[in-house]
Image (tube, rainbow, N blue to C red):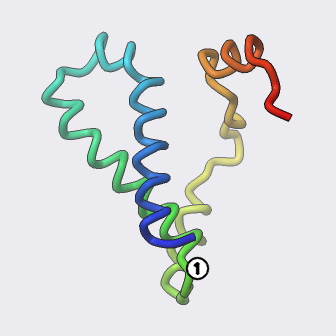
Amino acid sequence: MSDDSNKDMAKYITAVVNSNIHDFHAEHLTDAQMEQLNPLIKNAIYTALHSLFKENRTVVDDRFVELNSALIPDDKEEPMLIDEYIELLDNSPTIN
């Protein structure tokens, strides 16, 4: 994946994350705090994508992925699709 593709994907994923945490933001974080948090989220996502999908991978990329993968707890819950997306899926005709 190209660097521009990684950046575009990071922006898209950040938008999905922000949409999904909107209620949490409204209840627990000020707009100023979200303003500080958003670039941290976006940059972390971009870095993760870049380190995983960089066209000319290096030892540094592999080590970064290895180190961060080791931080995933064994008891971590599996990712799930968010409810809003599931609702859209359930009410959407297939394209094929």
Is 45 located above or below residue 33 in the figure?
below
Q: Which residue is mark 1?
A: 62
Residue drawn at x 60%, y 62% as measured from the top left: 70
Instruction: Answer with left or right where residue 78 lies relative to residue 62.
Output: right
Q: Residues within 10 Å of mark 1 (few under 14, many from 20)?
A: few
Residue 89 vs residue 48, the one in the foreground: 89
Residue drawn at x 48%, y 43% as measured from the top left: 13
Q: Amino acid at mark 1?
A: Asp
Is 47 located above or below residue 55 in the figure?
above
Is 64 located above or below residue 30 in the figure?
below
Is 41 located above or below residue 8 in the figure?
above
Residue drawn at x 49%, y 52% as measured from the top left: 9
Residue 36 in percent (x, y) is at 19, 40
Residue 77 in percent (x, y) is at 69, 34
Q: Residue furthest right?
A: 96
**Quarter holding residue 29:** top left
Q: Which quarter of the figure is the N terminus placed in?
A: bottom right
